[in-house]
Image (spheres, helix red, strand yellow):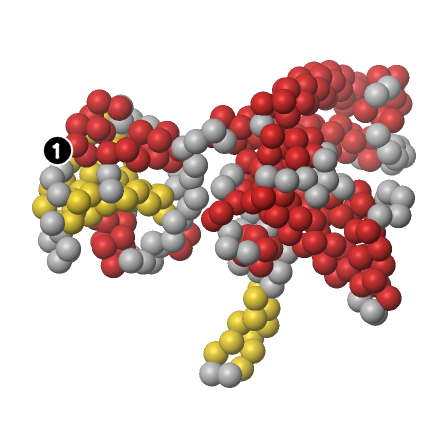
Amino acid sequence: MTRYIGLDGHSKTSTFVTMNEKGKLLEQKQVVTCERELLEFVREQKGKKKLVFEESHLSQWLYTLLLPEVDELVVCHPGYLAKRQGPKNDLRDAIHVANELRCGHVIPVFHDPGRMMELRSLMSGYQDLVQDIVRSKNRYKSLFRSEAIQVPGVGVYRSRDRIGELSRRTDRFIAEHLFDRIQYLEQQKKVYSERFRQNMKKHPDIKRLAGLPGIDTVRAHVIATIICSPARFLNKHKLWSYSMLVKHDQQSDGKSYGKVKIHGRSELKEAFLGAAESILQTTDTSLKKYYQDQIDKGIGHRNAKIALARKVAAICLAVLKSNETV
């Protein structure tokens, strides 16, 4: 008998339910969120076990912990779950995801328990750091713009003397603390960069990607850690869609309702478009010639640049699949 196990996990407590193939609720239990109690419940279940829970901050830990204990484990995308009526609580959520798994209505989120797990955590920390730097710089520059002081470029982030141009004492006080914060964050960014350079010696995939046109060390890490397993993309078109580099036509009854992008990873889109921009700023290469060919066909700059980004994405996927540098 197949048992469908639904898990609603939280930091303090987690709720399990088990149902059979006909949707009959067999068991329900709330446990403390710790390895011992989670494993104890799953191991008590007999027969073929299929487990499902929603993507959350606990997902990677739960996935790594419970994957060896079940026949099938699905981390589902909460945005694609069918909406249900009634009040929300942990038990009802667990029942809902278990029943959706039983009916085959869940959309899985990719997780990799292997060698890329630590690198994915490292990239997550780096991306949070970059966001903090951007926010701090925006707040810092806004102090100058509020007094119509022109601060073009990035020089304002390097010269502490510019703070004296602010007329209000409170603004100068805030600017000094923001300036110190920016300097500290930039120093931490250099620490991450050094870690990335070290990773290239340990991970051949990242080194191969970093050797491609337009792909620097950071972009190589982004691409490698998000793609993880290139075999999960059947072809380049699947990767383009996942990278939000193509639009899909919406049709019903033979009528088109416009084109939309499916939900994907904006980090990949930024990496591939950034690589395309870097290629356009370099000397003549075959990839730059490909862009020019698009322009010669009457395609505008934006669409030609996106086409170049798709070409870069296809090359990256080929490199990861073949383990060869092009």
Percent across and percent down for residue 323 are: 59, 39
Number of numbered discs: 1
Q: Where's residue 122, x and y in %?
A: 55, 26
114 versus 2 height, above or below: above
Residue at horizontal 72 percent and vertical 40 percent from the top? 212
State the residue in front, 197 or 60: 197
Q: Residue at x 23, y 55 (%)?
A: 102
Q: Residue at x 53, y 28 (%)?
A: 119
Q: Is residue 132 above or below residue 266?
A: above
Question: In this rendering, does residue 108 appear at all?
Answer: yes
x and y percent of residue 176 in the render?
76, 17
| The C terminus, quarter of image | top right
State left or right for residue 207 relative to residue 6: right
| Residue tagged 1 | 44
Between 159 and 318, the one nearer to me in the picture = 318
Amino acid identity at mark 1? Glu
Secondary structure at numbered mark 1: helix
Q: Is residue 294 left or right of residue 195?
A: right
The answer to which of 195 and 133 lies nearer the viewer is: 195
Residue 174 in view in this figure:
no
Q: Residues within 10 Å of mark 1 (few under 14, many from 20)?
A: few
The residue at 27%/55% (across/down) is 100
Residue 127 image position (x, y, % from top left):
61, 32
